[in-house]
């Protein structure tokens, strides 16, 4: 049976227990959870024409990417009662550089050997969204005791994190400009701030806006990037995150007494640049960073980006594009926070929110371990299989169809995963190959614990009776013996919240 016929068969016959795979018509046993309810719709994966416009330093489908929120610059909401024009001098500190390193150590302890990228939010001036378009000064609130310059603390963090399979880089913004920035007057005099046709300055959601095209023409984009690279080893990290890299200006308006944002293009009518020229300015920024050996990741695949997406950004923090999910492979475009039905293809975790919302780093690491196992571990595994189709049904469930008999179901916010009809994860319990370690390693985790549960080792993974087990915890590895490998099956017992690595 051809694959297309198989998909139509699958979508139409929700009650069938046996599905036929795309590998030579071989029958596959199917877990009952993977049965659509009522009418089902199917979208087939079709590879889009694709080429890289840059040279990625990482395969982001195989890397855990997150942010760590260090500090928020506070502001008075005098602009339409909600939006920011300048800092008010106050800061809310969530994490210092030393605490960030403790978080990185903890994340590495429960993801042994996995390459990680951490972007620091609020590393500059008074914190997040402070003093743009400048990003040349560190935040005093996050520095280590004894360091004269907070940037010394950031350099220390970037250097130390390498010991824990982690590249530390920055979260920056190339679009916003605030009145209290040390670079504001320079940008105003250079005439690179967005203006109306009559010459009046455009104010967006956060302050004034920089015209990418005008900034590039005046050489200020290169000046900013060169200055930053001279201060911090961004080129060694090989990646940077540009926030709010919109191709349209988010313009707040009062409607019925409430501010409503409208996205408007082109960015600066005064300069006479078209939307295409605005986009070209962004392309020049990305290409210049690429020439320095730095990948650019950005905020959202569908956030006023214009046409500069495919082949420019290997990773988006917010990923809600069905079109991209069904036309580009995970290695060509992937996401951090995944939204909608495409969560059936996996969804990573937001370490930023976990640590920011935890009362201590220790508690944050414990929460991170749980969420990493239930989300990111699964996503890294799914990213290794080609997508074939996305099926949705009347109940709101979504089903991911992959090559090699891999199936998923996203229902009631729970992702269930199976291979060749054998369950690998049901959200509370997971038994997932850790392929970044090799093809003879599996990580098992249980939220509530269980006694003598038997799992089938998925095809392509080799485990023998000589396999060793290790409990993974922030305190370090401990030997785990409460398991048995026999004829392609692993039987083990886990305590609540226990995470173990089984490897040959």
Image (cartoon, grey):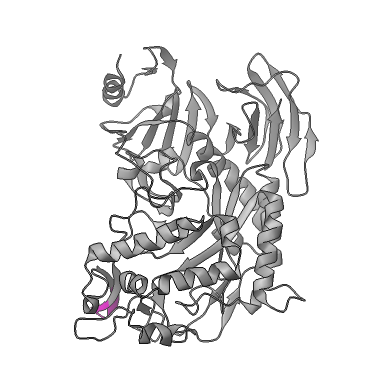
The residue lying at 41 percent from left, 52 percent from top is: 313
* Residue 240 higher or lower than 49, as above or below: below
Residue 424 can be seen in this image: yes
> Could you tell me residue 438's position as x and y percent?
63, 30
Quarter of the C terminus within the rendering: top right
Task: Give the side of residue 299 with respect to residue 467, left or right.
Answer: left
Viewer-side residue, 396 vs 89: 89
Q: Which residues are magenta?
A: 253-260
Q: Magenta part mainly helix, strand or loop?
A: strand
**Is 181 inside the magenta-drawn segment?**
no
The residue lying at 45 percent from left, 40 percent from top is: 331
**Is 259 inside the magenta-drawn segment?**
yes
Q: Residue 113 appears in which quarter of the rendering?
A: top right
> Could you tell me residue 111's position as x and y percent?
65, 43
Q: Residue 236 appears in which quarter of the rendering?
A: bottom right
> Could you tell me residue 143's position as x and y percent?
68, 73
């Amino acid at each position: 049976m051809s694959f297309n016929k198989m998909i139509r068969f699958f979508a139409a016959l929700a009650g069938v227990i046996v599905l036929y795979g795309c590998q030579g018509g071989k029958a596959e046993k199917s877990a009952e959870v993977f049965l659509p309810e009522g009418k089902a719709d199917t979208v087939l994966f079709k590879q889009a024409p694709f080429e890289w416009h840059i040279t990625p330093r990482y395969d982001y489908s195989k890397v855990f990417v997150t942010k760590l929120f260090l500090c928020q610059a506070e502001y008075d909401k005098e602009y339409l009662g909600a939006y920011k024009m300048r800092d008010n001098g106050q800061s809310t500190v969530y994490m210092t550089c030393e605490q960030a390193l403790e978080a990185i150590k903890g994340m590495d302890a429960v993801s042994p050997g996995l390459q990680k990228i951490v972007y620091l939010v609020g590393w500059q001036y008074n914190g997040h969204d402070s003093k743009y378009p400048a990003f040349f000064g560190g935040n005093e609130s996050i520095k280590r005791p004894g360091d004269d310059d907070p940037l010394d603390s950031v350099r220390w963090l970037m250097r130390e994190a390498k010991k824990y399979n982690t590249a530390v880089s920055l979260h920056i913004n190339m679009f916003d400009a605030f009145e209290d920035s040390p670079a504001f007057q320079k940008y105003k005099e250079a005439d690179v701030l967005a203006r109306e046709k009559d010459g009046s300055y455009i104010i967006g959601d956060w302050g004034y806006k920089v015209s990418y095209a005008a900034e590039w023409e005046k050489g200020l984009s290169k000046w900013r990037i060169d200055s930053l690279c001279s201060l911090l080893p961004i080129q060694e990290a090989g990646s940077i995150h540009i926030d709010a890299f919109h191709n349209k200006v988010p313009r707040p308006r009062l409607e019925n007494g409430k501010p409503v944002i409208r996205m408007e293009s082109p960015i600066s009518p005064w300069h006479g640049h078209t939307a295409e020229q605005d986009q070209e300015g962004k392309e020049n920024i990305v290409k210049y960073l690429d020439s320095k050996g730095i990948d650019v990741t950005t905020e959202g695949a569908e956030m006023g980006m214009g046409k500069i997406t495919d082949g420019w950004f290997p990773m988006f923090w917010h990923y809600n594009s069905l079109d991209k999910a069904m036309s580009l492979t995970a290695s060509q475009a992937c996401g951090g926070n995944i939204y909608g039905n495409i969560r059936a293809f996996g969804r990573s975790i937001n370490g930023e929110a976990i640590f920011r919302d935890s009362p201590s780093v220790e508690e944050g690491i414990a929460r991170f371990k749980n969420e990493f196992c239930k989300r990111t571990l699964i996503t890294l595994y799914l990213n290794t299989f080609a997508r074939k189709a996305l099926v949705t049904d009347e109940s709101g469930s979504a089903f991911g169809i992959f090559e090699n008999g891999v199936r998923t179901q996203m229902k009631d916010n729970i992702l269930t995963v199976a291979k060749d009809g054998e369950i690998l994860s049901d959200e509370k319990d997971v038994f997932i190959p850790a392929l970044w370690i090799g093809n003879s390693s599996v990580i098992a985790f249980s939220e509530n614990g269980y006694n003598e549960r038997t799992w089938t080792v998925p095809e392509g993974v080799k485990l023998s009776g000589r396999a060793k087990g290790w409990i993974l915890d922030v305190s370090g590895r401990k030997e785990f013996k409460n398991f048995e490998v026999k004829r392609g099956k692993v039987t083990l017992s886990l305590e609540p919240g226990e995470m173990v690595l089984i490897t040959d």
